[in-house]
Each structure stands twice: as structure tokens, then as C-alpha cells.
């Protein structure tokens, strides 16, 4: 039996990312239905804690991905540019990281601040509506991240041509 611990770590990174995305989404859905604002805040904080898994997963995937490149193309790692599927995968990964580091946290921080002001009874007029808009934006955020992850997975499995099957 042969194998690579780096590759194992690459797949673990993928697992962490799926956990963060799915767990975050499930807590997100639950928090939306919660009428008690104090409990809603607890759920939002739990969601944020789960979300912290994703930068760790992204770092693991990037480092192990680079080591994968060196292992798969040992004589000339720079040849990875010519692999269309790998290039597309890295570009989609970059989009995913920017979305996850910039847009997701901005929207969820705004929402948390709004809920805090609502709990303190200092929420401005139209806060409920603003809350709905922010929650819709978060749905879009999760949809985009899931789509990007599925595309990356598709490219990883079918791009390398290592798994001949039905097609
Ligand atoms: C969300 C991010 C990522 C996911 C879900 C992911 C997933 C995967 C999976 C499932 C495989 C196994 C493919 C197979 O054995 O057929 C793989 C292999 C690989 N990944 Fe990733 N990966 C990600 C990010 C990256 C990044 C950022 C890089 C490069 C910097 C990278 C480079 C590679 C390479 C070179 C292989 C080996 C391909 C081969 O053996 O032919 N991955 N990845």
C-alpha cells in the first residue's frame, strides 16, 4: 500500500470546508426562524465559530494543493499552468477565498450588529426589513460558495482523468 499524507491532508481540508459550509448554512436557517433575539444572537455566534473552520481549511487546501503540484509534476512543477482543469480550479478557489474572506464576514458582521442594537432596543426604523435583506444576501453567499465548491470538486475528479468510469 502506498500513499501520500499530504494528499490525505488535502482531502481532510476538503472535509473541513464542507463541514464549515454545511454547518454554517444549517445554523443560518435555524437562526432565521428564531423569534427570541437573545437566542438568535447565540445561534449567530455559534455560526461564526463554525465559520472559523473555513480559513483553516482554505490554508490547508492551498498548502497541500501546492505540495500536490510538486508531487504530481516533480521534474517541472511550473507545467501546472498548462493543465486547464488545474488552472480553472485554482482560479475558482481564489474566487471562493475572496468571497469567504471579504463578503461573507462583512454581511454577517452587519447582521450581528443589527441584532445587537435590536436587543438593546435602539434599532432604527426599518430594521426588520434590513435584517431580511442581509439574510437574503447571506443565502446568495452560501449558494455561490456551494456552487464554487461543487465546480472545484468536479474539476478535481474529472480534470485529472485518473478515474475512468461511465464517462
Ligand atoms: C476547495 C478547494 C479544493 C478542493 C475541494 C480540492 C479537491 C481535490 C480532490 C478531491 C482531489 C483528488 C482528485 C483525484 O484524486 O482524482 C484533489 C487533487 C489535487 N488538488 Fe485539490 N482541491 C482544492 C484545492 C486545491 C488547490 C488550491 C490546489 C493548488 C494550489 C490543488 C491542487 C491539487 C492537485 C495538484 C491535485 C492532484 C491531482 C492529481 O493527482 O492528478 N487543489 N483536489
Image (tube, rainbow, N blue to C red):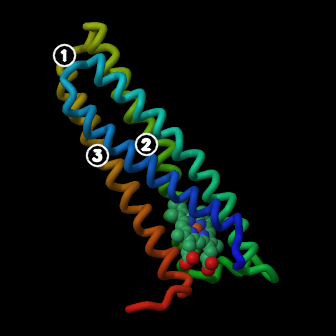
The residues tagged by marks 2 and 3 sit, at their Cα atoms, a distance apart of 12 Å
Q: Position of residue 8 (x, y in %)?
A: 63, 64
Q: Position of residue 123 (x, y in %)?
A: 26, 13
Q: Mark 1 or mark 3, which is nearer the start of the sequence?
A: 1
Determine whether 53 is above or below 120 in the image: below
Q: Which residue is mark 2?
A: 103
Image quadrant in which you'd find residue 118: top left
Please give the label number shown on residue 139.
Answer: 3
123 is higher (above) or lower (below) than 52 = above
Q: Residues within 10 Å of mark 2 (few under 14, many from 20)?
A: some
Of marks 1 and 2, which one's residue comes earlier in the chain? 2
Q: Which mark is residue 155?
A: none
Above/below status of 137 relative to 57: above
- Residue furthest toward the right? 75
Nearer to us in this view, 34 or 117: 34
| Nearer to the camera, 11 or 91 | 11
Instruction: Give the farthest residue toward the front.
Output: 1
Secondary structure under the numbered disc 3 in the rendered image: helix
Amino acid at each position: 500500500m502506498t500513499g501520500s499524507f499530504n494528499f490525505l491532508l488535502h482531502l481532510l481540508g476538503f472535509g473541513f470546508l464542507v463541514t464549515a459550509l454545511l454547518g454554517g448554512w444549517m445554523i443560518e436557517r435555524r437562526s432565521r426562524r428564531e423569534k427570541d433575539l437573545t437566542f438568535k444572537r447565540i445561534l449567530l455566534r455559534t455560526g461564526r465559530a463554525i465559520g472559523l473552520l473555513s480559513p483553516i481549511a482554505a490554508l490547508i487546501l492551498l498548502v497541500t494543493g501546492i505540495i500536490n503540484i510538486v508531487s504530481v509534476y516533480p521534474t517541472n512543477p511550473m507545467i501546472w499552468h498548462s493543465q486547464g482543469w488545474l488552472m480553472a480550479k485554482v482560479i475558482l478557489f481564489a474566487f471562493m477565498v475572496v468571497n469567504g474572506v471579504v463578503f461573507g464576514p462583512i454581511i454577517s458582521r452587519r447582521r450581528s450588529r443589527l441584532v445587537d442594537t435590536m436587543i438593546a432596543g435602539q434599532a432604527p426604523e426599518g430594521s426588520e426589513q434590513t435584517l431580511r435583506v442581509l439574510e437574503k444576501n447571506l443565502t446568495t453567499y452560501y449558494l455561490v460558495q456551494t456552487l464554487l465548491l461543487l465546480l472545484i470538486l468536479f474539476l478535481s475528479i474529472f480534470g485529472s482523468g485518473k478515474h475512468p468510469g461511465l464517462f
